[in-house]
Image (cartoon, rainbow, N blue to C red):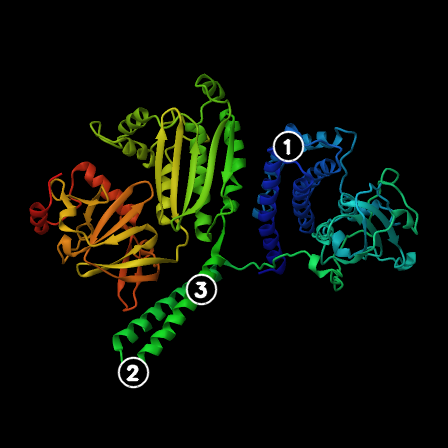
Amino acid sequence: MDPMEAIKQTYFQECEELLLAMEEGLIAMESGEADSETINAVFRAVHSIKGSGGAFGFDALVRFAHQFETVLDHIRSGTLSADAQVVKILLRAGDNLADHVAAARSGTALAEGHDSEAMDALAALADADGAEAQAPADFDDLDFAPVAIAVDAVEVGPVVWSIRFFPHAELYANANEPLFILRELKTLGTLHVHADLSRLPELDQFDPAHSYCAWDLELKTEASVSQIEEAFEFVIGDCELEITAPAEAQPMDDLAPTTPVLAPSEAETPVLAAPPPAIPTPPAPAAVETAAASTATAIKPTIRVDLDKVDRLVNLVGELVITQAMLAQRVLDGGGQGAASVVNGLGELEHLLRELQESVMAIRTQPVKSVFQRMPRLVREVAAQTGKQVRIDLLGEATEVDKTVIDRLGEPLTHMIRNAIDHGIETPQARTAAGKPEEGCVRLSAEHRGGRIIIELSDDGRGIDRARVKAKAIEKGLIPPNAALSDDEIDNLIFLPGFSTASEISNISGRGVGMDVVRRNIIELGGRIIITSIPGCGSRFCLTLPLTLAVLDGMVVAVGEQTFVLPLTHIVESLQPKAEDIRAFGHGRALLHIRNTYVPLVDTGELLGTHLNNPPSKGVVILVESEGAGRLALLVDAIVGQQQVVIKSFEGNYQRIEGIAGATILGDGRVALILDVDGLVTRCRSSLQTGGRTGLPNEHEAEISQTGTTG
């Protein structure tokens, strides 16, 4: 790969993170949190995108980011107030900046005038208080004589820090500007700036691609060294920087400048020592020095790794776990002298392997924030298209999930949110007439629950119009006219391919695609989606997904001649039932009486096409619970054991089977199917509603009829 292309890819990966940080800050500003830290975070994100974009020649991106940055700088300096209207413009500008990044990444150009409205709005803000938006410096027209600048000081701190700052040429080439850094330092306290021109050569030896000017800064502040270092965080490596531990507090009057000082109002020339028309070989950067190491910024180092490499590592660790299980099984089967010590060693190995596997799996996880932060923009766009007032509340953004799940969540959530706004949220007039606030609310949350991740999307709209849904399904031939459906079954009709209640096709809906994609994607991830809707109050979509797609802790059970694995996260308890606690309930069905309640008792073998060897009273009942579909008592022959298993894709190697989540290889080399508890429970509930068999085989009905009672 072209080295420059590889650097570009790194830049675009960084842009993703910077755009998320920008979006997060703008949303915080929208909610009234326009503090200096938030504003500075947004400014730094835009500035970084602009700076590196200039190095690659993304001129349109740089021009737009510069205008955006100028407005943010006015807000930082206090000359422009971040009121609701201003923040609204900034949000739209953030959307346009994301469009510029996407266009640069794909190598395409945005449509003519795509950002003109946002540019005009930003320019108006920049000029609102008499401040003219700065154009990027034309270095050919600059007088290269450096100037010193003294910022009007406000006495805020008792401690004086000495800072030596010498920018390399790369700092300027990356579109960074020392003036912004000095302004940032000014916000921390009283600042005096002294220009060091000792390196400036004679004119005939002057190299325009080199850097000659340095600054000695004296900052009186209560801020810590980590806060001071934050002002330089985007130029570390492109400069020499020394921050000297503070001496005993002394009056700033004693710190007289040794070079001429100009206030910003008297000299608007950017503080530039030399122009950056070319990127020379960088000198070795000096380390940032602080005498007080205990106050140094604690920045966690990170690396970028190709996901394929991580997947390969995960697979290898999974194979290692399988091999360890096989060795343990063979030792137990073989017996012999010294077996006890070998078993102990294998136990320690198992413990270490579990820690290794958990550590490797943690590498694959990341917060759902990367997906959630895309949704506010979507809500704004769809709300504008539909003429509705909608806000989105995000909760649980720090919840960590497998990277594969993260990558597949974006499309389903996009369809669901568009559907919620278009079909669920009413117009402001309709909401007012219904006694609701004009602004509708969409709520998106994520949390860990019972070893799985639960993602809920709810709205406070009109809810599902079941009569209309059923009528549309009949009209489209998706169900027979005389179909007798429960409310849950009607709600689930919206997931059928080709289904839509929209009266006409629009950019948002009407083509009958979307919700079927949602269900298919969630099922492919080993998850399930459940709908709850109350007419006039709103709807809730609950997505249950596995935390990881690679391993799980399971209970190995025997059913006839077959072995299956039940995920421990779904198991409530296991017990050996008494004959009198099993009650017949119609033909081929039974209930288990447990602690003053009745739970459907299901013959697991009959469900899975095999047969139990033991009668119910000699077997074992596994009480399982699914998300949204209640509890079920699964009857099996015996519990073989409990172990961590490596999930192998069943669908990828064969095809999807209802009630089967995947497969694994046991210690004895046999393949065992992993049961999908949510699927089994839903399947059994459906069978109960239609009067089908879910319970006991015919040969065991006599035992129940003699010992139990008919329900």
Q: Which mark is residue 56?
A: none
In space, the residues marked 2 and 1 are separated at their CA atoms by: 76 Å
Between 492 and 280, the one lying in front of the other is: 492
Q: Are marks 2 and 1 in contact (CB under 8 Å)?
A: no
Q: Nearer the viewer, mark 1 or mark 3?
A: 3
**Percent x, y for residue 665?**
30, 64
Q: Which residue is mark 1?
A: 87
Image position of 416 (left or right of 486): right
Q: Please name the amino acid that badge 3 sits on.
A: Glu
Q: Which residue is mark 3?
A: 355
Between 620 and 178, the one lying in front of the other is: 620
Q: Residue furthest top?
A: 433
Q: Which residue is mark 2?
A: 337
Disc 3 is placed on an element classified as: helix
Residue sitting at x 30%, y 51%:
571
Image quarter hosting the C terminus: top left
In space, the residues marked 2 and 3 are separated at their CA atoms by: 30 Å
Q: Is residue 506 visible?
A: no
Q: Is residue 207 visible?
A: yes
Tally the numbered discs: 3
**Percent x, y for residue 305?**
53, 60
- Considering only order in the chain, which callout, 3 or 1, is on the residue closer to the N terminus? 1
- Considering only order in the chain, which callout, 3 or 2, is on the residue closer to the N terminus? 2
Disc 2 is placed on an element classified as: loop
Q: Residue furthest front?
A: 595
Q: Are marks 2 and 3 in contact (CB under 8 Å)?
A: no
Snapshot quadrant of residue 344: bottom left
**Percent x, y for residue 467?**
30, 24
Between 219 and 523, the one lying in front of the other is: 219
Disc 1 is placed on an element classified as: helix
Image position of 370 (left or right of 500): right
- Considering only order in the chain, which callout, 1 or 2, is on the residue closer to the N terminus? 1
